[in-house]
Amino acid sequence: MFKLTLRVPSSIPLELDGITPDRVASLSELEVARLPVLHGNRSEQLGEFFDVTTRTLPKADLQFAGDTGHVKGIAARMRGGFIHVEGNVGMHAGAQMSGGTLVVGGGAGDWLGSEMSGGTIDVRHSAGNQVGAAYRGSRRGMTGGTILIRGSAGDELGLLMRRGTIVVQGDCGEFAGASLIAGTIALLGQIGGRLGAGMKRGTIITNREPVLPPSFKFACEYRPSILHLLKEQLASIGATGSFGSGSVRCYRGDLLTGGRGEVLVTSHGS
């Protein structure tokens, strides 16, 4: 539909919350250029910063080009459609989105997919902290959808996550799955400490030896059907890496919050 090319990168963040495929679907190039965005604490027109032209990617409803690493809120609150970003995105990309697809050709800042309820996010490089997490003071993080990070991720991945799937092919920081309520987190690289701290339910699966809080206990070793289902899901979203198909060690926790969550450790390396 439209290609938005940032003319000159700015050290002052731009906030594009609400610039989504459904909003621009019936607009002309001129009307899109007049949409309001935040530049620091001032409301400006989109066209002051972006060149607006017809799209070049057949699948993309919105295509972002230029140095967008400081542009916040790309695909935030998106309900459907396809957004493709050629380079990096700033904070809050895909936050609270409920449908559609966001593909990021570069990396992403903090709060990627925070509190999203549906849709798919595919980041080709690394992401920052609080991926799929709840905002401070909120009781629920991600409640649906899928996030694939092909590089590494920062701290507090999936904080207070309620439903959905997060896959990280690279390394991730500390407190991954902290206070997890439900959902699945699949980790294919090295993991920081305090994995699953405070989790109530849900599943975290890893092929590396995790550093768990002392409030987790070994439960059993078995061959879960989830490995087969997870393999199919990873293939469907184009993720690489594997958890194998053999037995896993299951740890239950966090015992301080009921102990109904599970951390599954496979013996199959990446």
Image (cartoon, helix red, strand yellow):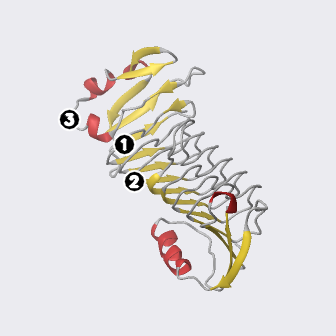
Residue 237 badge: none
User: Mark 2 or mark 1, which is nearer the start of the sequence?
Assistant: 1
| Residue nearest the viewer, comparing 179 with 210 | 179
- Whether label 1 touches label 2, CB < 8 Å: yes
- Residue 110 vertical position relative to residue 198 in the rendered view, above or below: above
Image coordinates of residue 90 in percent, x first then y, are: 55, 35
- Could you tell me residue 159's position as x and y percent? 59, 49
**Residue positioned 69% across, 58% down in the render:** 256
Question: Where residue 123 sits in the image (x, y, percent)?
Answer: 54, 51
The quadrant in which residue 50 appears is: top left
For badge 1, the amino acid type reads Met
The tag earlier along the polypeptide, 2 or 3, is 3
Position of residue 261 relative to residue 160, above or below, is below
Q: Which residue is mark 3?
A: 26
Q: Helix, strand, or loop for circle 2?
A: loop
The crowding category of the residue bearing disc 3, from other C-alpha atoms within 10 Å (few below 14, some 14 to 19, many at least 20), is: few
Q: Nearer the viewer, residue 65 or 43?
A: 43
The quarter in which the C terminus is drawn is bottom right
Instruction: Tell me the residue that label 2 is attached to.
Output: 119
Residue type at mark 3 is: Ser
Number of residues whose C-alpha sits closer than 10 Å to that of mark 2, classed few (under 14), some (14–19) or many (20 or more)? many
Q: Quadrant location of the N terminus?
A: top left
Q: CA distance from mark 1 to mark 3?
A: 16 Å
The CA distance from mark 1 to mark 2 is 9 Å
